[in-house]
């Protein structure tokens, strides 16, 4: 054997196999993996786990001029401790692949620091290739001007149709590699892919049956799964749970699933873990919902996915539950039910109640009394920008000892509700100190919603600020944008007063035992109805202070109601309503002149205490199905 041939064989590791599709070259160590670049067209297969820790700076396999066009089958093995530190573009285990196929591989504990663009742990740019059953766990630190950075692939595109990333999972962090101002973060940052798209007419690329727990931060086009999903992209059966943060000046293009996208089907993100309330596409879900197989519409649990109901999220068959998912289940209490009308989420403790804000559109039902005394300052569910739009059924249980201390608007158990339904719940001993506007024991603002059989009992107290307005024992302000809305079978007791020492002219306005203010109706089809309700709330304020309602600015109907709580104000006070500035109907409504300390202001009918305790006083009231009365006592709801 010539010396040159002998030395050649000693210098270049020899792999088993011939490099054909039926007899691939078998890679068993780091040196053999590194020598893939000797033949970029061959077929390769791992024969062992490979540790790259001895290679201080990995050189990506394949360039744009000389791409990897072969295949790599990981055969279930792991490549660990990949390290890259580079200022070049197109960075990853592979730099550029073309008409290639990579599958059945795990990248573990990789670390990439680069100041270029088109960066992914597996591939910098994938052109007309498929990537299947690959998991990548590690960290990418990009430069301040970098773009198209993904936890698995930087850019994914195709000259053909239906090239796909399938059955893939990512976990770790993608962040800026140096101290930077907010406008210097990179763009096109995604948990699996930074940029995905296809310019060819009628040809699509896809991400399917994949999920990400990658924490990502960038300037714009930032998403838990994809940063920018461009032309002719389909995203199918995916979810994202990692934190998503847009720190840059153009941070509007950010989403829990995608920053900017084309199409997403049966794909989800978790609001609270991603930190994102919106996504270009996809559907927001709670942790509890994603622990239930029924949530995953049309997903294939026979061949592709698996789940342990109530204790894990869906994960790919043949793999263990990822660490990030295991820790997620520990941190977020899982509720029974599916969050649907037929199977609402069941809330049994304070932590589960707090998690209603994870999914503001779901159906919820109490399964036990809930004590909030351990929560020093309750954060209301729903905001003006992100209202609660679901259904909440208390099932007759009690939420007690809620405490709020805030200078913000929209304070209550719920902050803002829209097209929602709340029913059959008791509030007991709530204590609210709030100096903003729109304050209520149940909700600060009720927009186009229905409230039925809600009762505030015990030592309830609202202390408002000197400039506060629209404060009610249950609702701060109520309106409707479409159709008439009903507040029925409600009751309140307790106190509403100013939170600091003040003269009567400094007290807030629009203060009511049940509702602070009614606005936004019309004379034809939009009325607010307050029916079959009563209040023993003591209320004090400046203008428009009433035993049931502070003020009515638009169209409302009050029927079969009464008030007994003391009403105190500098002007515009009333036993039922403090002031009405437009059309109203007040039918069969009564107040106790002695206990309310109010005289007839034209709204409701004044009665003596003795009269208020006689059934004959209450004209046309339904004492068969709705009300009950014992002679010598005030009526109560059945």
Image (cartoon, rainbow, N blue to C red):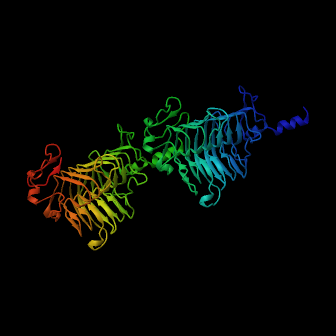
Residue 442: quadrant of the picture: bottom left
Residue 503 % position (x, y): 27, 74
Q: Residue at coordinates 49% horizontally, 51% vertically from top-left?
A: 275
Residue 192 % position (x, y): 59, 43
Residue 69 % position (x, y): 73, 34
* In this view, 78 is above or below 408: above
* In this view, 561 is above or below 39: below
Check the image and name the residue furthest to the top: 22
Residue 363: quadrant of the picture: top left
Is any atom of residue 51 visible in this view? Answer: yes
* In this view, 132 is above or below 616: above
Q: Is residue 528 left or right of residue 615?
A: right
Residue 124 % position (x, y): 68, 44
**Image mark count:** 0
Is any atom of residue 73 visible in this view? Answer: no
Residue closest to the eye, 257 or 6: 257
Residue closest to the eye, 635 or 508: 508
Q: Residue at coordinates 48% horizontally, 32% vertically from top-left?
A: 298
Q: Is residue 608 left or right of residue 373?
A: left
Q: Is residue 497 left or right of residue 274?
A: left
* In this view, 596 is above or below 531: below
Task: Pick the quarter of the image with the N terminus.
Answer: top right
Q: Residue at coordinates 36% horizontally, 51% vertically from top-left?
A: 417
Check the image and name the residue furthest to the front: 524
Residue closest to the eye, 405 or 400: 405
């Amino acid at each position: 054997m010539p010396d040159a041939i002998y030395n050649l064989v000693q210098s270049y590791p020899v792999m088993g196999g011939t490099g054909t599709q039926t007899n691939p070259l078998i890679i068993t160590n780091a040196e053999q993996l590194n020598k893939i670049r000797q033949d970029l067209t061959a077929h390769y297969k791992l024969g062992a786990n490979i540790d790259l820790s001895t290679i201080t700076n990995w050189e990506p396999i394949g360039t744009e001029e000389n791409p990897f066009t072969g295949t790599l089958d990981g055969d279930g093995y792991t490549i660990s401790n990949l390290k890259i530190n580079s200022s070049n573009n197109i960075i990853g285990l592979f730099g550029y692949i073309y008409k290639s196929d990579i599958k059945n591989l795990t990248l573990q504990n990789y670390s990439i620091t680069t100041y270029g663009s088109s960066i992914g742990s597996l591939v910098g740019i994938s052109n007309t290739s498929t990537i299947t059953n690959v998991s990548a766990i590690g960290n990418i630190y990009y430069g301040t001007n970098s773009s198209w950075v993904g936890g698995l692939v930087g850019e994914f595109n195709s000259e053909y149709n239906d090239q796909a990333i399938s059955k893939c999972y990512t976990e770790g962090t993608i962040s800026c590699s140096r101290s930077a101002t907010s406008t210097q973060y990179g763009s096109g940052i995604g948990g699996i892919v930074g940029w995905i798209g296809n310019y060819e007419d009628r040809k699509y690329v896809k991400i399917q049956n994949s999920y990400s727990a990658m924490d990502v931060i960038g300037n714009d086009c930032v998403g838990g799964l994809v940063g920018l999903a461009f032309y002719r992209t389909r995203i199918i059966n995916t979810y994202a749970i990692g934190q998503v943060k847009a720190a840059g000046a153009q941070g509007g293009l950010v989403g829990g699933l995608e920053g900017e996208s084309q199409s997403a089907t049966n794909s989800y993100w978790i609001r609270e873990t991603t930190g994102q309330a919106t996504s270009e596409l996809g559907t927001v879900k709670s942790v509890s919902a994603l622990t239930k197989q029924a949530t995953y519409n049309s997903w294939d649990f026979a061949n592709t996915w698996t789940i342990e109901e109530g204790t894990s999220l869906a994960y790919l068959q043949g793999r263990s539950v990822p660490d990030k998912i295991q820790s997620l289940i520990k941190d977020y209490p899982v509720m029974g039910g599916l969050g649907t009308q037929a199977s609402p989420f069941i809330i049994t403790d304070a932590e589960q109640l707090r998690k209603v804000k994870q999914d503001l559109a779901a159906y919820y039902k109490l399964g036990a009394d809930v004590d909030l005394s351990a929560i020093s300052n309750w954060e209301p569910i729903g905001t003006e920008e992100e209202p609660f739009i679901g259904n909440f059924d208390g099932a007759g249980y009690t939420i007690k000892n809620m405490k709020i201390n805030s200078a913000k608007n929209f304070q209550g158990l719920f902050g803002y509700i829209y097209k929602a339904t709340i029913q059959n719940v008791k509030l007991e001993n709530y204590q609210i100190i709030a100096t903003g506007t729109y304050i209520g024991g149940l909700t600060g603002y009720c927009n186009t919603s229905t409230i039925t059989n809600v009762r505030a009992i015990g030592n309830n107290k609202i202390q408002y600020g000197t400039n506060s307005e629209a404060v009610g024992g249950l609702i701060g302000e109520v309106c409707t944008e479409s159709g008439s809305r009903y507040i029925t079978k409600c009751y309140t007791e307790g106190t509403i007063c100013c939170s600091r020492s003040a003269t009567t002219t400094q007290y807030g306005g629009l203060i009511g035992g049940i509702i602070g203010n009614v606005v936004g109706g019309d004379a034809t089809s939009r009325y607010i109805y307050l029916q079959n309700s009563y209040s023993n709330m003591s209320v004090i304020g400046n203008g428009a202070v009433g035993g049931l309602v502070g003020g009515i600015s638009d169209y409302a109907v009050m029927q079969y109601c009464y008030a007994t709580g003391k009403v105190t104000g500098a002007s515009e006070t009333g036993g039922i309503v403090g002031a009405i500035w437009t059309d109203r109907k007040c039918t069969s409504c009564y107040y106790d002149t002695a206990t309310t300390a109010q005289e007839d202001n034209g709204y409701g009918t004044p009665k003596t205490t003795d009269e208020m305790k006689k059934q004959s006083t209450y004209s046309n009231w339904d004492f068969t199905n709705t009300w009950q009365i014992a002679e010598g006592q005030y009526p109560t709801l059945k």
